[in-house]
Amino acid sequence: MIMRFFIKTFGCQMNENDSERMGGLLHSLGWEKTDEERKANLIIVNTCAVREKSEDKLFSYLGRLKNYKRKNNTIIGVTGCVAQLEKDKIFERAPHVDFILGPHNYHKINEIIRNILDKREKLVDTQWQKEWPELSEKHVLRESQAIAYVTIMEGCNNFCAYCIVPFTRGREKYRPFWSIIKEVEQLAQQGYKEVQLLGQNVNSYFDVQEGKSFVDLLKEVNKVNGIEWIRFITSHPKNFTKDIAHTMKDLEKVCPQLHLPVQAGSTSVLQRMRRGYTREEYLEKVNYLKKLIPDISLSTDIIVGFPGETREEFEETLSLLKEVEFDNIFSFRYSERPYTLASRMDDNVPYEEKINRLIELQRLQKEIQIKNNKKKIGKIFKVLVTGKSKKDKNMWTGRNIYNQVVNFKGNDLKIGKFVNVLITDIGPYSLRGKQVK
Ligand code: SF4
C-alpha cells in the first residue's frame, strides 16, 4: 500500500525549507507526497509562532483535520515553533493530534512515524539540540525547480523585546561551511539557478571550525558554476556591515536586493524594542548602500502599535518609509508573545488604533510601490522562470534580479530558464510584460 503525506506550512521561507527537509526524509523511506489532505495517511502541520495570528490559524486548521482523523484514521503531527512552546495546549485543544516535534528535531521525523505506526501512542519530542543535524541533500523534497532554499544558520541571540524566536529556535547555531557549499554544488548540478541562503540572522554566520564568516560564505557560493543568482535573508541592521555591502557589490552573482528589517522609524520605539540601532544609524546604512549599489532594491518589516507607540512615533515610521522608498514591506500589528520582554510591557495602543495605523502605513507603501514600479515600464529585465501564473494559465511567472514577481507572455518556456521580459504594465506588487529576444 502506498503511504502518502501532506505538509501544511505556516510562516517564512525557513519553515518552508524545514518542511522540504521533512518531506525529503519521508520520501527516502518510500512515502509519497500528496497535495490533497483527504488522500494523506499522514498530515504534518509545520507551525510558526512569531505572531499570535499564526497560532490562531493553526488551531482553526487543526479543527478541520478532525474529519480526516475520523474518516481515514490519518496520523496528525504538529511540528515547528508552536509545537516547541505549546505542546500541552495543542493536545488539550486538539486531542486528535498524534505527535509533536519541535524545530530542533525535524531530522527524527521517520523515527517518530515508525513509533506511531507500531504503537499508536502519542509522542512528543521538543528536546533542544546544540549541534547542527546534518542531512544529506537528497533528503530535501523541494517545492521549486528554479529557486532553492539553503538554511545556513538557525536561532537568534538578539532577544528583541517582541520576538519569540530565541525561545523556540534557541541560540544561534551555524551549519558547517563545507556542508553548505556541498549542497549548493549539488543544487547547481540539478539545474538550480538561484539559491537563497536562510537564517534568522544570516549576517552573524560563523563557522568556528573553519574560521569562515558570512562574507567568506558568499564568496565561496559565488564560485559555484551553474548558480547565477544568490540572495540571503534575514539580515539584522546591527550586523549588516560595510564589508558585507562591499561584498554584495563586488560579487557578480549576489543580487542587488536586500531585506533589512527596520521594525519602526522612531529611535525611542527601537530602543524599547531592543533593536540595537537608532533611526539615524539605520538610515546611514541605507544611504551608504544606495550610494554603493545605486540600483539596490530594499524591503523591510514593520511592526505598528508596539507598547507605548505614540502617534508622533508612528509618524516617524511613515516618514522613514517616504525617505527610503522600499520596494516592498511586510507589516504587522504588534501582538503579544509569551516569554518576551514586551509581554511585560503595557500593551496600551488600542486594537482599533493598531488596525488604523496598519491601514495608513500600507496605503502609503502601496503608493510608493506604484511610483517605484512605474519607473520600470518600458525596461527589459532578465527573469528567472518559476512556473505558470496562478491567475492566468496563459501567462508565465518568474522573478527579476530584484526578486519582484513578473507575469508575462512567453513561448516554449521551461521552469529554471532565464528570459528577457519587456515590462508593459505594473501593479503595486508585481510587474507585467512580454518575452523579448
Ligand atoms: S533579530 Fe530579533 S526579531 Fe529577528 S529573530 Fe532575532 S530576536 Fe527575533
Image (cartoon, grey):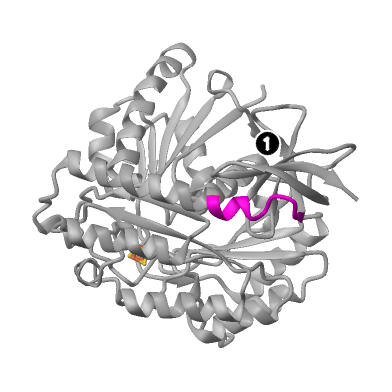
Q: Residues within 10 Å of mark 1 (few under 14, many from 20)?
A: few
Residue 374 belongs to the span the image colors magenta:
yes
Q: Quadrant of ligand 1?
A: bottom left
Front position in the image: 133 or 349: 349
Quarter of the N terminus within the rendering: top right
Q: Which residue is mark 1?
A: 30
Task: State left or right for residue 178 relative to residue 324.
Answer: right
Q: Which amino acid, by three-letter code, is at mark 1?
A: Gly
The answer to whether residue 129 shows anywhere in this view is no
Residue found 20% across the figure and 59% down from its top: 340
Look at the numbered disc 1 and give the secondary structure of its residue: loop
Residue found 42% across the figure and 80% down from its top: 284
When asked about the image quadrant of residue 59, the answer is: top left
x, y (%) of residue 353?
19, 43
Over which residues does the magenta segment extend? Answer: 371-381
Residue found 61% across the figure and 74% down from its top: 294
Residue found 79% across the figure and 49% down from its top: 421
When asked about the image quadrant of residue 65, the answer is: top left
The answer to whether residue 285 shows anywhere in this view is yes
Task: State left or right for residue 289 relative to residue 128.
Answer: right
x, y (%) of residue 78?
40, 38
x, y (%) of residue 156?
37, 68
Q: Is residue 94 above or below residue 332?
A: above
Front position in the image: 432 or 261: 432
Front position in the image: 248 or 214: 248
Which residue sits furthest top?
71
When asked about the image quadrant of residue 66, the answer is: top left
Residue 437 belongs to the span the image colors magenta:
no
